[in-house]
Amino acid sequence: MKPAVIPQHIAIVMDGNGRWAKRRFLPRLAGHKAGVEAVRKIVKACAEKQVKVLSLFAFSSENWKRPTQEVNDLMDLFMTGLEREVPQLHENHIQLRFIGDQAKFSDKLRDKIHAVQDLTRANTGMVLQIAADYGGQWDITCATKQCAAAVARGELAPHDITAETLASYLSFADLPDPDLFIRTSGEMRISNFMLWQLAYTELYFTPLLWPDFDEAALDAALLHYASRERRFGGSE
């Protein structure tokens, strides 16, 4: 791969942990743990390929509907992952960011998230962005409320609101929108992930379940991306 065709920002919906475990007659938690191993491999590969931003959809707003035990297991795995992985990420100059509501998280987990962000804030390597309790509709709703509040304060006139104005209130407004979206497990939908920011993103769907997604699978996605001609609504 030539650096010229490496996307600046890759966004991934990591789907299929449960099915991976089911096919092996294992509990769903085993699939989520295997998914963590896949995250480690892909973060390393993206950093080595000099991807500037990697966004991972770890937990959606809709995932709270899952069985209580599974949600608790995911929260515990999230906490454990932060404790184990952050020191090495920090050593490799990776900056961690988290987007999402987080109001339903425990105080302990929220404190850990804030501490990790503070620790890695000045890092100048790849930005690893974790979407947790995130939804694209939630993101747009929050941005709209902020715009409305600015109008109410007299800081913004309604007729001055543009797409760029609204975008400035969205999550990660200071980062480039995703160039490449990847979803594993064969499902061909966005599932409320970065609805605004994916407007002109190249979409790539693979039947591989997330725990089986490795560097070779990432290379296949990058080759697909490199073959695309991005016109952003312009002429051929």
Image (cartoon, rainbow, N blue to C red):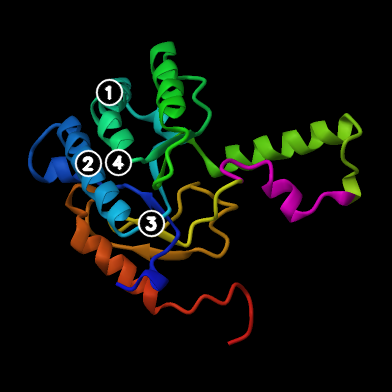
> Residue 206's image quarter?
bottom left
**Amino acid type shown at disc 1:** Glu
**Residue occupied by mark 4:** 92
* Mark 3 or mark 2, whichever is nearer to me: 3
**Residue occupied by mark 1:** 83
Q: Nearer the N terminus, badge 1 or badge 4? A: 1
**Amino acid type shown at disc 2:** Gly
Q: Is residue 221 left or right of residue 54?
A: left
Q: Nearer the N terminus, badge 3 or badge 2? A: 2
Q: Is residue 213 above or below residue 4?
A: above
**Residue occupied by mark 2:** 35
| C-alpha separation, residue under disc 1 versus residue under disc 3 | 24 Å
**Amino acid type shown at disc 4:** Asn
Q: Nearer the N terminus, badge 1 or badge 2? A: 2
Mark 1 falls on what kind of element?
A: helix
Give the quarter of the figure containing the C terminus.
Answer: bottom right
Q: Nearer the N terminus, badge 4 or badge 2? A: 2
| C-alpha separation, residue under disc 1 versus residue under disc 4 | 16 Å
Identify the residue at horizontal 45%, vertical 48% (top origin).
Answer: 191
* Mark 1 or mark 4, whichever is nearer to me: 4
Q: At which x and y percent is residue 164? A: 73, 53
Q: Is residue 20 left or right of residue 138?
A: left
Q: Residues within 10 Å of mark 2 (few under 14, many from 20)?
A: many
Residue stretch in magenta: 160-173
Mark 3 falls on what kind of element?
A: loop
Residue at the outermost bottom position: 236
Q: Nearer the viewer, residue 23 or 38?
A: 38
Q: At which x and y percent is residue 80? A: 25, 23
| C-alpha separation, residue under disc 3 versus residue under disc 2 | 21 Å
Which labelled disc corresponds to residue 51?
Answer: 3
